[in-house]
Amino acid sequence: MNENQKIPGEKIAQIEEYLPGDNTFEDDESIRATTIGEINLDSSERLASVNSQTQITVPKIGDIIIGVVEANLPSMIAIMIKYVNGKKVVADLECICVTRHIRKKNIALAKDVVKVEIISHINGTIHASIDSQELGVLFTKCRKCFGTVVKMRDAVKCKDCGWIDDRKLSLDFGKSDFITQN
């Protein structure tokens, strides 16, 4: 790759020199690329952008994400982004969602489909929130027998084995049919 070509997350300019343009985002003091392509530093407009053949959708602050939980850690969950504002994403992007302040045993478990909101981009990492009522788990299965579950107030109950499990459920829980791949 030549010096003019950049990859997602790579620094292309300082914020004091340029403003973020197409296919870029601001990260502290730097402007970074969101896609693979050639940099374009427009001195007259003071705009840094990346010209690209293919577009990788990096969600912006305030975007609503639907994704699959890939990892469940004690104070956060890692989510593979599948949809941004209802549009399917072809790139493999992940975001993290801090959960230590939510008083539930299980916010979401691995392979749950969740709805979150992007709140920041810090050090090249996409951060999300699951706090508001419309955000949370959209689809899950029983963690004991992988059977179908139904909503019971703020928990889910398995139709097959009767197991009751705590989750941070979205207001939209159970309103969509999901086909999950193992």
Image (tube, grey):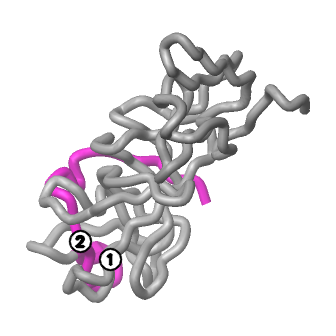
Residue 162 visible? The answer is no
Q: Which residue is mark 2?
A: 168
Q: Is residue 34 above or below residue 43?
A: below
Residue 5: where, in percent of width, then height? 79, 28
Left or right of 118? Residue 168 is left
Q: Which quadrant holds the N terminus?
A: top right
Residue 111: say if magenta: no
Q: Which residue is mark 1?
A: 99
Quadrant hosting residue 101: bottom left
**Region in magenta:** 156-182
Disc 2: CA contacts within 10 A as few (<14), some (14-19) or many (>=20)? many
Q: Which sits earlier in the primary sequence, circle 2 or circle 1?
A: 1
Q: Nearer the viewer, residue 47 or 34?
A: 47
Q: Amino acid at mark 1?
A: Thr
Q: Nearer the viewer, residue 97 or 156?
A: 97
Label ID, residue 134: none
Q: Is residue 8 above or below residue 143?
A: above
For the residues labelled 2 and 1, the Cα–Cα distance comes to 10 Å
Left or right of 39? Residue 78 is left
Left or right of 17? Residue 171 is left
Identity of the residue drawn at 20% across and 65% down: 131
Identity of the residue drawn at 50% across and 50% down: 29
Identity of the residue drawn at 47% across and 42% down: 26
Q: Is residue 33 above or below residue 146?
A: above
Q: Amino acid at mark 2?
A: Lys
CB within 8 Å, label 2 to label 1: yes
Q: Nearer the viewer, residue 131 or 146?
A: 131
Name the element at disc 1.
Answer: loop
Residue 21: where, in percent of width, then height? 50, 24
Q: Main secondary structure of the magenta part?
A: loop
